[in-house]
Image (cartoon, grey):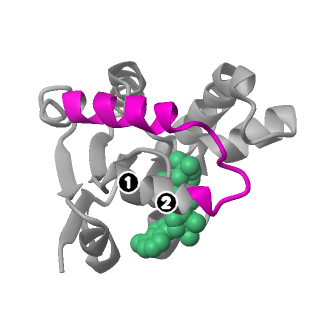
């Protein structure tokens, strides 16, 4: 088993392409109110969790909720792909603004496996190019997470490692 070690009061970024299992992983290891999902916020503001035009509004509200939680001393997980450096930069800045530690958990599951999973999802019928692009972005960013300011970084290197992961909260 792999230990995913996060500070008890942290802002945790899940990092992984669509289909890598972020939402499933978050449901298994964290409490329901600890996880803020970009899809849920997109759905709240637009009625459609896949409406990309709602992304800016969704993140504005997600970050507002995350900030309120962190100010109350509550660990918060952001369930979004975080494959773009700009998305991670904003999360690190939010953590710093609220005096908590930013943590990253990377779900590095092969693109083909993610594509196969997504093919079975009615709500994720986007073209193969989307996954390709996300995968390229992830590859480029994965080595620099500590340099970007993440104070704890865990990389789960296969679906099996994701399945076996245990959560450890450090005081
Ligand atoms: P998205 O970025 O599109 O929201 P995601 O990273 O949140 O994707 P999930 O929704 O958790 O991915 O999982 C994608 C699909 O893969 C789901 O159908 C889920 O049931 C399946 N799945 C998730 N984790 C596993 C796993 N560890 N083993 C097998 N199947 C899995
Ligand atoms: Mg998801």
Q: Which residue is mark 1?
A: 112
Magenta stretch mostly in which secondary structure? helix
Rendered residue at 12%/35% (across/down): 143
Q: Position of residue 129 (x, y in %)?
A: 48, 31
Give left or right: position of 52 versus 29.
Answer: right
Q: Quadrant of the C terminus?
A: bottom left
> Residue 132 colored magenta?
yes
Q: Quadrant of residue 166?
A: bottom left
- SS at mark 2 in the image: helix
- Is ligand 1 less than 8 Å from the beta carbon at label 1? no
Asked if residue 12 lies left or right of residue 1, the reply is: right
Q: Tell whether label 2 touches label 1 (CB within 8 Å).
A: yes
Question: For the magenta stretch, what is the residue range?
Answer: 119-140
- Res 39 visible: yes
Disc number at residue 116? 2
- Image coordinates of residue 158 in percent, x first then y, are 25, 64
Residue at mark 1 to residue at mark 2: CA–CA distance: 6 Å
Is 120 or 82 nearer to us in this picture?
120
Q: Nearer the viewer, residue 57 or 85?
A: 85
């Amino acid at each position: 088993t792999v230990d995913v070690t996060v500070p008890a009061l942290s802002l945790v970024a899940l990092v992984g392409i669509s289909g890598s299992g972020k939402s499933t992983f978050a449901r298994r290891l964290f409490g329901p109110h600890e996880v803020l999902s970009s899809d849920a916020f997109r759905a709240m503001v637009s009625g459609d969790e896949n409406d990309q035009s709602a992304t800016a509004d969704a993140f504005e509200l997600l970050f507002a909720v995350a900030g309120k939680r962190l100010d109350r001393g509550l660990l918060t997980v952001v369930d979004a792909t975080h494959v773009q450096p700009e998305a991670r930069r904003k999360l690190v800045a939010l953590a710093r603004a609220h005096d908590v530690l930013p943590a990253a958990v990377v779900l590095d599951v092969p693109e083909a496996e993610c594509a196969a999973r997504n093919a079975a999802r009615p709500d994720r019928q986007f073209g193969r190019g989307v996954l390709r692009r996300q995968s390229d972005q992830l590859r480029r960013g994965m080595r620099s997470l500590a340099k970007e300011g993440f104070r704890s970084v865990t990389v789960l290197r296969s679906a099996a490692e994701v399945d076996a992961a245990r959560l450890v909260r450090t005081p």
